[in-house]
Image (tube, rainbow, N blue to C red):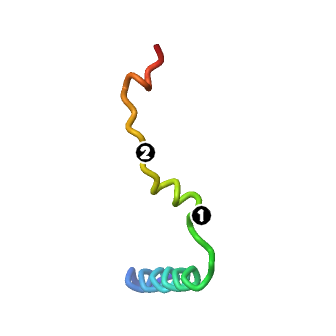
Amino acid sequence: MFPNPAALLCLAGAVLVEAHDEWQVTDRRYLSEGFTALLTQPTEEVTTAELVPA
């Protein structure tokens, strides 16, 4: 199908660049704003005693 590995790499790179360009010009996101807000919230430190039931 492909004459050499470089030809396959070139095609794969072109497909990825095209997909990236489409995502840049639309409002679609990989992760929602709500989910990314959860990722940036500070977390409370939990001790081992709190994790193990008595």
Residue 10 sits in which quadrant?
bottom left
**Numbered circle sitting on residue 53:** none
Q: The residue under label 1 is which amino acid type? A: Ser
Give the x, y percent position of residue 48: 37, 26
Left or right: residue 4 compared with residue 33? left
As helix, strand or loop, the secondary structure at mark 1 comes to loop
Residue furthest to the right in view is: 27
Which of 39/20 is in front? 39
Q: Earlier in the sequence, mark 2 or mark 1?
A: 1
Return the residue found at the far top: 54
Name the residue rendered at 56%, 64% in the picture.
31
Depth-wise, is mark 2 or mark 1 nearer the camera? 2
> Residue 2, image x and y in percent?
47, 83
Q: Which mark is residue 32?
A: 1
Residue at 56 percent across and 67 percent down: it is 30
Residue at the location (48% across, 80% down)?
12
> Residue 20, how many percent across, how many down?
52, 81
Q: Residues within 10 Å of mark 2 (few under 14, many from 20)?
A: few
Residue highlighted by disc 2: 43
The correct choice, above or below, for 53 with respect to 9 in the image is above
Q: Is residue 53 visible?
A: yes
